[in-house]
Image (cartoon, grey):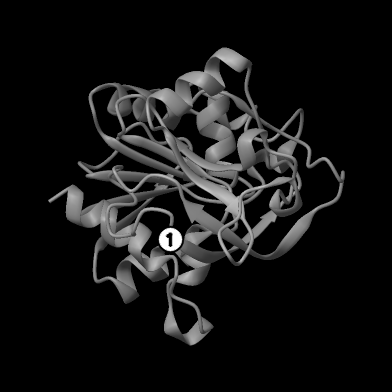
Amino acid sequence: MKFGIVTFPGSNCDQDMHHVLRNVLNQDTVGLWHKDVDLQNCDVIVLPGGFSYGDYLRSGAIAKFSRIMNSIINFANRGGFVIGICNGFQILCESKLLPGALLHNNSHKFICKNTYLSVTSNSSRFTSKYSLNQVIKIPVAHGEGRYHANENTLNSLKENDQIIFQYCNSNGKIDIGSNINGSALNIAGICNINRNVFGMMPHPERASDSELSNTDGINFFLSAIESST
């Protein structure tokens, strides 16, 4: 299948994504520039991590006005697969393809470390290769990763099984002690109501190569590949 990986000014995880998808998983990948309008018949669009436009104003706030985003929004609204990782998640929320917003970590510090996630739902196109409530270890690297939404939105996410990953401890316990950034409901990743748009703050592409001694993230991509073929 064909993945289109978008590069914005300030993106810094686009090549990591190319490596995993192309070299580890043998998928067709193309680079898409933020000024493009043609998505080159890609099956999946990926918005990678980084600091698009220097995170001025707030993370993702300027990137949503890039020319390519109109094409991506139309693609998603037609049922196309869109994945946003870290800064990509922020852009998807700013573009209203996903509900809620990403705010400054409650510590007001940049967090860069491995963290544990619980697979809250494995009924999504992005987690079907995981077991329900499976605990995985995935790196994070963000300063604005605190997921926030109003009570109605949070209730809707729960009712519609849209919460995909939650921060937990190594035993899978989801509580305030395992909430690394203050996210509502320990949310680390969600999908839209139609389950074709997905965003998460942790970086599965940094846990998908045996050379890094961690492949807990590989099933995220395998799930997307399997469900899209």
Give the image quarter of residue 178: bottom right
Q: Secondary structure at mark 1?
A: loop
Identity, as a three-letter code, of the amino acid under mark 1: Gln
Residue 62 in percent (x, y) is at 64, 28
Q: Residue pushed farthest left?
A: 229
Residue 190 appears in the rendering:
yes
* Residue at which label 1 appears: 134
Q: Quadrant of residue 225?
A: bottom left
Which x, y percent locates residue 21?
Answer: 33, 65
The residue positioned 43% from the left and 54% from the top of the image is 133
Q: Which residue: 67% across, 39% down? A: 53
**Hey, which quadrant is residue 171 in on the image?**
bottom right
Q: Is residue 65 visible?
A: no
x and y percentages locating residue 150 in the rendered image: 63, 16
Q: Residue furthest top?
A: 152
Point out residue 121 in the picture as x, y percentages from the top left corner.
38, 44
* Residue under the image location 64 percent in, 58 percent down: 140
- Left or right, residue 215 beside residue 201: left
In what quadrant of the picture does the N terminus appear? Answer: bottom left
Asked if residue 183 lies left or right of residue 100, the reply is right
Would residue 34 be found to the left or right of residue 125 on screen?
Answer: right
Tell me if residue 52 comes above or below residue 74 in the rendering: below
Classify mark 1: residues with Cα within 10 Å, few (<14), some (14-19) or many (20+).
some
